[in-house]
Amino acid sequence: MTYMVTYFRWSTSDASSIYKWYTSLVYVTPIIGGFLADRYLGNRAAVFIGAILMAIGHFLMAFEASSIFFAALVFLILGNGFFKPNMTTQVGRLYPPNDRRRDGAYTIFYMGINMGAFLAPIACGWLQENTKGGFHSGFAIAGVGMLLGLFTYMFGQPFLVEYKEDPQKPQLAMGVLSEEEAEQQPSLMGGFYVWVPLILWAGAVTLLAFGTYYAFEGGIKKAAPALISGVSLCAVAWINGSVKNAIRDRVTTIIVIGLFAIFFWAAFEQQGNALNLWADKVTNRNLTVDAVPPAIYPEAAEIFADEDSSAPGQAHGLWDSFKNTVGRFGIIFQLKEAKAGSGGSVINPVPTAWFQSINALGIFILAPVFAYLWLKVDLSIPTKMVLGLTAMGASFLVMVLGATAENQKHSVDLKGPIPSSINLDSEGHILIPSFIKLGFNGPTIVKNDPAHAGRLRVVNGKLECFGVFSDLERDALSMLSTPQSFKDQLEVAAKGLDQQKSEGKPRRFDLTLPNGVAGFELRYGGFHPQGVQFDNQANRLTIKQTLAEKDQKALLVCAADPSFRSTLDNLMVESSKSRVSPQWLLWCYILATMGELCLSPVGLSMTSKLSPRRYATMLMGLWLLVSAFGNFAAGAMGEIYEHTPPTAYFGYMTAVLFGVGLILLALVGRLTRMMHGVR
């Protein structure tokens, strides 16, 4: 998330939309991967395929182009579809059916996964801060880690001995019905028993109908969620209708608990979305000093955007491409000169990525405790789920308190008038126009959203805000004051540079700034000196690199109204005093981790216990689909994060989580009985 908004300069809502689709599809594809493994490939071959695809995706993310970024996401989505359900299913197959040790085994499995999840942000975050490649060197090392993991899995095959059940001597816990016995045991749903698959089919058909309608109307983004949900619900309805009696009770229990788990994941996945931005922009990441040094100007690029491409006139064959790729990986891992041997403080500021390690470290430390707890305290699976939702609600209650501490008032003198392109409402709140296009050829609507979630306004010649005013918000507002004449020139320059690149010519475009641009300041762009240069005497901008969307936005900030931009700079510095202690995120993540250990590994174990053998991997994929819907909801919430005050944003989630937990608590007894002895 931070990569998209800081490197590509995408808006928070646009980045959240991409995050929403990526993290959702990551959990949709396991259904396909599970089906292929059950029918054709087998678990181990599917894991191997998935690991290779994911490694390719990570290596592709080491390149800057947005088109390659999206291609990398596709590889990661497909790879995870093969990898995750099949690796997870193999854990359950190491133990006899209904063995209580499975809960502990899945918890230990979770602990192992999160040992890597703890080390990865530490390594990638350090590389981002200290190497020339920045984010991209972190992505590259992730690909290396994926390959190391694959080699470990391959060499460890002799130690993975799956349990082979003797049909004459089934290994069952006392009071637990075998699958064959459960098929003969009457359902506990009464008259509702017949209606469950019919309701599921009706829901699936309804969703598919809505999806088809939206598809023909041109609303692709609206159509996809309904179509994916409809197809998934078809699979659920088919499985539910294919089993009978107590087996149907068990499958229905998976479905019901899965619905509640969606709310948990919608909140939990804020760690990669809103909470990640909170860590980057709102948290005081300096641990040993009191001052919060604001980054007024972005750091200049260490790598020239086009320096790793072949020189004009050279052949662009496969060998040249290979040499350029190898050369690039040699460059991105080089230490930044300012950092090499400087002995500077690693913890001032702490890399934002390091906060992502809190959850993984918590799991690594607490997983054995919870594994032992589940062996000693005989709680039902639905009860554990209630505890998970409650802990998750408590974690966001902590963030409500943190947001209250952040919501301090700041103001600076307004230098000059507000630019005519900036709108104000009746109370002086600054409004940002957003453009919404309906359908393929529908009308364009201009919507004015309050800047800084309605916490920024002009009052008596001052610019006043509550909370931390970030550099992202400064840039978004600054661009609105850039003269249209410069925007037109920049569009011509971008097209000209693209044409030169396609013709194999050296990239160069000289642009004389129009009269409306005053106080052009290249420091706001963060460009490599060889890529973009500005001659102040001649008032001329020389561009020697192709201009991606992020580069054009950076130049728009450079050409913004200087007095307004300076006011925004001052407000950003002043409001940095509202940065809050990292302890708010620390305790939020610890409570979320406790909730995760109550819900996630237990859910995996539950699915492996309650699933009929012939649908085991497919149902595991469907359980992972719960996370897909949760991630989609998390991304959808993230789209409104920049327009919602933090206290309200975190407060809504707290209320919903506690409310859903109470509803599930009321159903615990019924769901426990429907599991027919499984604990």
Image (tube, rainbow, N blue to C red):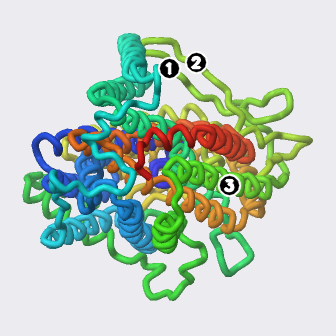
* Closer mark to the observer between disc 3 and disc 1: 3
Say what amino acid the circle numbered 2 marks: Ile
Say what amino acid the circle numbered 1 marks: Lys
Residue 389 is left or right of residue 458, and the answer is left
Query: Are the two marked residues, 1 and 2, in contact with CB atoms closer than 8 angstroms?
Result: yes
Precedes in sequence: disc 3 or disc 2:
3
The residue where tag 3 is placed is 394
Q: Position of residue 457 (x, y in %)?
A: 81, 40
Residue at 15%, 53% in the rendered image: 168
Question: Mark 3 to mark 1: distance in Å?
Answer: 39 Å
Label 3 crowd bin: few (<14), some (14–19), many (20+), radius 10 Å: many
Question: Mark 1 to mark 2: distance in Å?
Answer: 6 Å
**Viewer-closest of 670 and 301:** 670
Precedes in sequence: disc 3 or disc 1:
3
Residue at 28%, 49% in the rendered image: 85
The residue where tag 1 is placed is 437
Q: Position of residue 401 (x, y in %)?
A: 76, 56
**Viewer-closest of 278 and 237:** 237
Q: Quadrant of residue 248?
A: top left
Q: Position of residue 304 (x, y in %)?
A: 35, 61
Question: Mark 3 to mark 2: distance in Å?
Answer: 40 Å
Mark linked to residue 42:
none
Q: Secondary structure at mark 3?
A: helix
Query: Are the two marked residues, 3 and 1, in contact with CB atoms closer than 8 angstroms?
Result: no
Q: Secondary structure at mark 1?
A: strand
The residue where tag 2 is placed is 445
Q: Secondary structure at mark 2?
A: strand
Judged from this view, the residue extending furthest toward the right is: 460
* Closer mark to the observer between disc 3 and disc 2: 3
Q: Quadrant of residue 476?
A: top right
Precedes in sequence: disc 1 or disc 2:
1
